[in-house]
Amino acid sequence: MVANQVAGCFEWAEQSRLVAVASRSEKKAQAFATSFNIPKAYSNYEEMINDDEIDVVYVATPHHRHKEDCLMCFEHGKAVMCEKPFSLDFEEASAIVKGARKKGVFCMEAMWTRFFPVLHDVKRRIDAGEIGDVTSLIADFGFPTPYAPEKRFFNLKEGGGALLDRGVYLLSLAHFLLGRHESVRSVAEIGKTGVDETSSYLLKYASGAVANLSATLMGYGTNEAVINGSKGSIRIHSPFFHPVSISMRDKISQQAIPATPGPMPKYGKVTQRLRRMVMPKLSKIAGATLVKKPYPGLGYQFEISEVSRCVQAGVTESNIMPLDDTLTIMRLMDEIREQLNITFKNTLQMPT
């Protein structure tokens, strides 16, 4: 699904062109190429990365394949934008990063949320002290996912669970806004297949701030993020992971103050159901004055444009989504899984 959404945004990405697609199925590769007017379709990954016309490979395979696929691209000198989560764990992530740095090629995690203009506006306001000293970040991400034990969401061997699928957005947001954490405590509801169907993470920071984060596959969340400070607060309205708007409240009036939002995207058929689940009607946001500034597509063009900018500039990492940030978040998720007694690499033990 995500590969379709990313491909659909290339027409709005700066200095970028989609020239080839590869799948293990020739039929799927041809169908994808036809859907997006892609000139070349390969039924073999190795054949595609030997194509001299290709500068960057977007790795959108299931995350248990990311290490293998990224390293194969580096061996052929191809830059990589790798879909989140970057890998199954810190060990695999480290191998990817070392492989990219050894070969001197560009690599970046495709953490969609990190590139939206509205999120950078939030970061600027926090750094400028507009809400004073940050005391807490409260955010959650959830909507019901149809139960299918063999599919990746609920399949432990494929890195299933709420943490890697949705919690990674929350942890990346917290790291971007608050910096490196000091400690983390986590709890979860473990399902029949051994994955965390719902999990929560409480992080503490040297500044005294805390982040209270929750992710679930089983029900609806507010899908908002609120950053509270000594002078006021900022709310990133639903869906925070695809941010459209923010509002601010000051300590005196506690009334909503208009803030520069991210623009309202257009939604294709693929995302209409998701939009209905996670985005409340803006007219129901009490007291908020929102400014809409539409842009085309779903916003993946921002991360695509960043990759193109970096590659053309000859740099091997993005300063918006540096590899060290990715490694920090992967190590954090390892720590959370250790607390929850979840492992992907040992024999699967079903809960009794």
Image: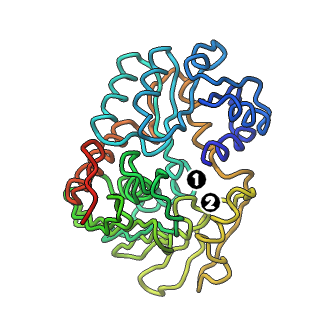
Say if residue 133 shows up in the picture.
no
Q: Residue tagged by mark 1? A: 117
Where is residue 220? Give x, y as percent.
51, 74
Q: In the rendered view, tell whether residue 114 sits above or below residue 277.
A: above
Percent x, y for residue 158?
41, 45
Residue drawn at x 52%, y 69% as measured from the top left:
144
Type of residue at label 1?
Pro
- In the picture provided, is 318 more to the left or to the right than 7? left
182 over 231 or under it: above or below: above
Secondary structure category for the residue under label 1: helix
Q: Depth check: 314 or 86 in front?
A: 86
Name the element at disc 2: loop
- Classify mark 1: residues with Cα within 10 Å, few (<14), some (14-19) or many (20+): some
Q: Please report the residue visible at 62 percent of the width from the left and 36 percent of the height from the top.
A: 305
- The residue at 47%/27% (across/down) is 69
Q: In which image quadrant can residue 251 be found? A: bottom left
Separation of residues labelled 2 and 1 (CA atoms)? 6 Å
Residue in the picture at 52% in, 85% down: 255
> What's the amino acid at mark 2?
Gly
**Disc number placed over residue 178 in the picture, else none:** none
Give x and y (percent) for residue 317: 44, 30
Q: Earlier in the sequence, mark 2 or mark 1?
A: 1
Given contact means CB atoms under 8 Å apart, are the residues at marks 2 and 1 in contact? yes
**Of residues 296 and 149, the one drawn nearer to the viewer in this rendering:** 149
